[in-house]
Amino acid sequence: MMTIPRFWREIRQRYKGVGVECGNCERVYFPPREVCPHCRRESIGKMKERELSGKGRLVTFTEIHEPMPDFKMMVPYIMAIVEMDEDVRMTGQLVDIDYDEVEQGMEVDVTIRRLGEESPSGIIYYGYKFVPVR
Amino acid sequence: MQNSEKRSTQESGNLREVAIIGIGETRIGELWDQSLRELGINAGLSAIKDAGVKGEEIEKIYIGNMSAGRLINQEHIAPMIADYAGLDDIPAVRIESGGASGGMALTEGYLSVASGLHDVVVVGGAEKMTDVGDEEAKKILSSTADWEWESVFGATFDSLYAMMARYHMFTHGTTKEQLAAVSVKNHAHGALNPNAQFQREVPLKIVMGSPIVSDPLTMFDCAPLSDGAAAVVLCPVDMADSFNKDPVAILGTGMGADHMAVHDRRELDAMKATRSAGDKALSMAGLKPEDMDFAEVHDNYTISEIMAIEDLGFFPKGDGGPATERGDTSLHNKIPINTSGGLKAKGQPVGAVGINQAVEAVLQLRGEAGDRQVEDAEYGLIHNIGGTGASAVVHVLGRWR
Ligand SMILES: [Zn+2]
């Protein structure tokens, strides 16, 4: 799925949802970027870390029946694009809800769950998923 | 107007007019008995034969290919194919832009001739998707999306298009029946194409009842992953008379770009890259969407075709689904889309797709498209998407009189 160094390099982003804010226009990005696509050169050196609130709303979603090989155990599972309160969007699984209860615009929270296993060594890794706000 | 300015720049000699003078393609499908090398050679040699060019006249070869390194463990495929085609002294280079590799290779070939650098150039596309299993092939295709921030979280390539489909449905009331109508229409067209992977009509009921891949997309909303290759031969139009066939001119070319990940785009019911590529190509040709007699668009999923026919200006945003259901995009109707059968029925050898589209357009413009001929076709457009829309390329082709 991912090499171990590659996963650990981004552990803070994957685990905690740490993005960046552009010091020039205050737009927030996740995952972190070195350059703000809006301000370009004005933003260089001004991108600061920004922890996200973890709250957002569903923009769109799907239920996957034909998964990636590493996600077979979870089928069917729900994927969603979520717009966070900071006006930045993320892609992740939506869990703890039945598919027929999912609605566009519904409020969700970020949570930390098991993402998958690093084959073939079998190291389990964790990352963000979304859960409905009850 | 900008159109006429652009056109006059080309006419005034800054860019030479470029023609396609030869085409060739293999059958598309699960071709277990043919390697990538053989597919590439067969397509290339048939294009060279069609044009009537000699090997020593060819100055450069461009080959579109998505992922030979992962699909057949072979990188550096362009010199390999050239070598085995007996063209070992002709420089050959591979062009990669995901699913748009073929179309991007065509642009590179066009530029090398239009600029005056080369006179005769061969542009091919080739992909061997079925040596690895279907699951592995899909995983490799998914790496043309954002692997680290989409795929790793479980998003398949299908699911990213499914989320665009669902958003289009929310926003414009597009229905599953309208998505299915794209598949039914493209299968009906594919039934008329002897090179298509699927040459059978498929009724709406079967499409609607097929297994869900990623809701709302069913098996029949998704194009297959196929083996195949295609090639075209380019030269300046003023040299075209010395070869076999009536030239088809490349009147306009345009590339478009967008964020890599779907979640970074504000519009999920449209592809900015398609719109931008289409606008540039049409503007360069000095033509409008309504001037086109047909188009080959990148229907890797049914939703992709619906978005493409809107983003290319054939129908207003939101009318792509209803237009398909009305039959506007079927052969002999308002604007026939994917007369070849498209990726859905003709097949999807990923890096070859853009060249397969060029082959279909040339057949239509020469009047050689047989049972699926668009009457008196004068202008056609071809549209090729990379990944989930981070890159796109459009060419406008026309008969050269
Ligand atoms: Zn900024």
Image (spheres, coloured by chain):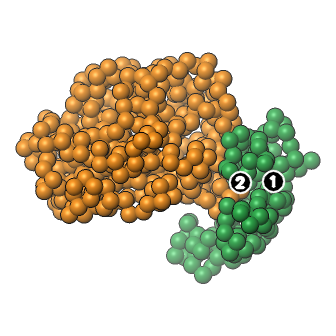
Chain colours: A green, B orange
Task: Give residue B26's position: percent from left, percent from top.
Answer: 34, 39
Residue at x 67% of width, y 50% of height: A68
Q: Measure how far apart labels 2 and 1 are at the Cα level.
A: 19 Å
Task: Give residue B149's position: percent from left, percent from top.
Answer: 66, 60
Residue at x 68% of width, y 33% of height: B212
Residue B197 showing in the rendered view: yes
Above or below for B87 versus A51? above
Please tell me how crowded label 1 is: few (under 14), some (14-19), or many (20+) other residues with Cα within 10 Å: many
Above or below for B268 versus B89? above
Q: Residue B134 or B21: which is nearer the viewer? A: B134
Q: Chain of mark 2?
A: A
SS class, disc 1: strand
Residue B2 showing in the rendered view: no
Disc 1 target residue? A130
Residue most extreme to the right: A134
Within 8 Å: ligand 1 and the Cβ of disc 2? Answer: no
Please tell me how crowded label 2 is: few (under 14), some (14-19), or many (20+) other residues with Cα within 10 Å: some
The three-letter code of the residue at mark 2 reads Asp
The three-letter code of the residue at mark 1 reads Phe
